[in-house]
Image (cartoon, rainbow, N blue to C red):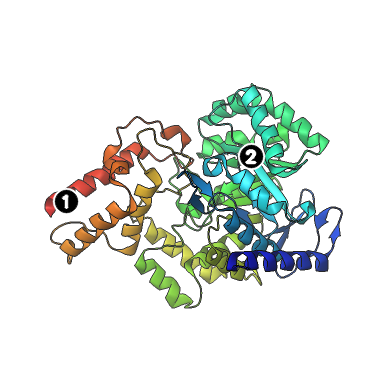
Amino acid sequence: MDRRQFIKTTAAGAASAALASCGVKGGKPQSEGTMEMRTNPINGDKVSLLGYGCMRWQMIKDEEGRDIIDQDSVDELVDMAIASGVNYFDTSPAYLQGQSEKASAAALNRHPRNSYFLATKLSNFRNWSREASMKMYYDSFDVMETDYIDYYLLHNIGRGGFEAFSRRYIENGMMDFLLAQREKGKIRQLGFSFHGSQPEFDAMLATHDTYKYDFVQIQLNYVDWKHADGVRNVNADYLYDKITALGLPIVVMEPLQGGALANLPRSIAQQLKERDPDASAASWAMRFVGTHPGVLTVLSGMTYQEHLEDNLSTFTGFKPLSEAELDFLERLATTMKEYPTVNCTACNYCMPCPWGVDIPGTFQHYNRAVGEGDFPQNPQQKDFARLRRRYLLSYDRAVESLRQASHCIGCKECLTHCPQSINIPAELHRIDRYIEKIRREG
């Protein structure tokens, strides 16, 4: 038996033992175990405060050189998560080139269906015709081999304003259909994920009187709590207060702001270490989100075992932040807004680029250099030559030359797909001008 098979077997056995010890009542998990649990005020579900976002499973190449999800890795991570008390898994037909639902289900279906909550979405932002939307809905059931979905979301609401919501869900009759499906029990809880401005959010929340949403999914972290840009995104404290005032539970996405809060600028990371030498940067961000009682579950896209282990250590025996710690993070957030990074969460909705540009790869490389302090600025800077050489070499290694920012022609095909409303062509051109500048100065 190889290492991977050993982990898979032992994790599955641990998961079965954990479920057997807690028992199942009414078709849903009942025991809280050691994982921090939250009760859904709408239907009483006992949900793990740590939820699994299935958008960042590890990808490998198949025999023909195509990108596919590493199913063995997914199986291992799901087994470990369930054995540790995680019971909420969030996927979408749009994730990972359309492969996430199938890979997630393949791992989850090895466990009793009543041992976890399954969330997926109607991700019809490319084709909102009734025919395409209905097909996407039914395909999710077929692909995941289930006859009900616990938490179903209208995906990526806010972009395009209320008119886009109307075209995607009202005019084509999909809202009436989904409400009927909820009535039949095919959908246990119906909600929406939001990316947009305050007027768009207010307009969407006003439809609650008509549609009676069961939950809302929002971006929430200690930077966006009070420092969202106010144009593309709304301060999370505003969203939180409005949603909880309606008595609705909140599912949180991007608690690490696309990984940025786990890979902080050195000066910020040092302050966290001085405050608590044993705590990871990610654990600070996760504790911030979990401290808010209106949060039902915190989604984290854990690609590797070390990500899962770190989050499990945070949410097992969970400790909310104190007022002093909340104030400390607010001071750090204020400082971090001064760094000239791109607010990219690497969701890959902008991909594939029709001209082959690796958009998230380019942004991630740039953000990493800024965050680590290895950011060549001008020839007067100390160690400019060394920083310049290292930046250019690392850029060529991280992003193939034919996929770099210089190849963006500004077609704007990516703009309508970005949930953060980043002006992607402008940012790519800005980074390209910066790279050309430091090349010339060398």
Quick check: 436 above or below 380? Answer: above
Q: Position of residue 266 (x, y in %)?
A: 35, 67
* Residue 244 visible (yes or no): no
Q: In which quarter of the image is the C terminus?
A: bottom left
- How many numbered badges does the structure rendering display? 2
Q: Which mark is residue 195?
A: none
Quick check: 228 above or below 163? Answer: below
Callout 2 touching callout 1 (CB < 8 Å): no
Which residue, given by chain and number where applicable, does mark 1 sit on?
439
Crowding at mark 1 (Cα within 10 Å: few <14, some 14-19, many 20+):
few
Distance of label 2 from label 1 (alpha carbons): 45 Å
| 46 or 330: nearer the viewer | 46
| 62 or 107: nearer the viewer | 62
Q: What residue type is labelled 1?
A: Arg
* Residue 136 visible (yes or no): yes
Q: Quadrant of the N terminus?
A: bottom right
Q: Position of residue 164 (x, y in %)?
A: 55, 27
Q: What residue type is labelled 2?
A: Lys
Residue visible at 13% across and 59% down in the picture: 379
Q: Is residue 13 left or right of residue 310?
A: right
Q: Where is residue 297 in the image (x, y as percent from the top left)?
A: 65, 56
Q: Which of marks 2 and 1 is nearer the N terminus?
A: 2
Q: Which mark is residue 121?
A: 2
